[in-house]
Image (spheres, rainbow, N blue to C red):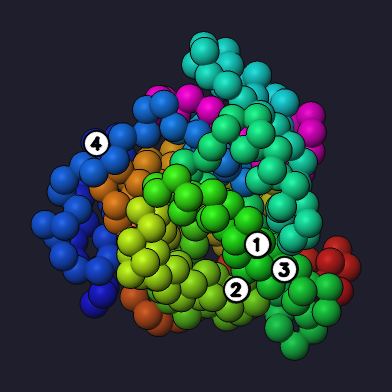
Amino acid sequence: MSCFSFCFRRASRCNAAYSFTPPSNASYKEKKYDLAGKTAIITGSSQGLGVHIAHKCAAKGVKNIALIGLGKDLLEQVAASLREKHPGINVFTKEVDVSDFSQCEQLVQDVLQHFGSCDILVNNAGIPGIIEFSISGLQKINGQIDVNLKGPIFLARCLLPSMIQAGKGHIVNIGTMSTKRIEPFNTLYTAAKIGILGWTYGLREEMKFLKTGVTVHLVNPGILSDVGLAMNNPEKTRLAMAEAVKLGGSATGAEVADGVMRAIEYDIPETTVNSMPFYWEANDILTKWFQTISDSVIEGGLNK
């Protein structure tokens, strides 16, 4: 059985649901925070899930958004889209490698100078890591730890002092449903994300204990059906993914972005967004999908 206490249905997709953790239903029924007028940094926002999060923030009234990612042209395209759909919004863009601490430091300095403060950090930047572990190279291993684990930690470390000084702030870490089930061929990615899970809960309690006014959240997407691995993959991989989705469910970028907003507004520690229940076990269909991706990575020489 799932360790989560309850789910609720979404009107836009009859089988999409959220699971909240830990099991204390009443705690999350009262809206505690309003996003209107706030300032947010969103990493990994040049494409994919980060774009959905940026647009959802703007729709919720976030006034200032710092789009952070790789690909200056892509970032500017997202910025233009935000300005067109949400007149009056202020958008800042910057290319940043979140695995580089000095770049994170400079980013925080630039954002604070540009906007004066920052209320929300969404640590969304990440890279896929599906590979057969026994033939994974050092670059592949380091990439997972450097980007998916150290990146969020670096950026939070650089921004947190200003949040503590202001007596408020939200850090939202994008996790994964991979930490809720057993996933062969995805061990490196899962290892980094389990690190994020533990760090999120520890930092949340640390901020609470110190009475800083800062709170920390984790949002776990299921298999994303319209961004990320769902896009631009060989037919064999797409077919295997379709079978995995039938078995284990999925989520859209918009649904996960909505989960991010709810995590902040209702101060939810951890939210998993997926269309079906999930269990701590492995299954052959999901494993076969990961294996097809691993095979394509190896064929492309990208396992080094």
| Residue behind mark 4 | 11
Q: Quadrant of the C terminus?
A: bottom right
Element type at mark 3: helix
Element type at mark 1: helix
Residue 192, numbered label: 2
| Relative to 213, residue 22 above or below | below
Element type at mark 4: loop
Residue in the image at 70% along x and 24% along y: 77
| Residue behind mark 1 | 154
Q: Within the magenta stretch, is there residue 66? A: yes
Q: Within the magenta stretch, is there residue 219? A: no
Q: Nearer the viewer, residue 132 or 121?
A: 121
| Residue behind mark 3 | 146
From which residue to which does the magenta span run?
Answer: 59-74
Residue in the image at 59% along x and 30% along y: 115
| Relative to 40, residue 276 above or below | below
Measuring from the top left, give residue 245's x and y in whole percent: 45, 58
Please identify, in this view, whether the residue under mark 2 or under mark 1 is nearer the observer: 1
The amino acid marked with disc number 1 is Phe
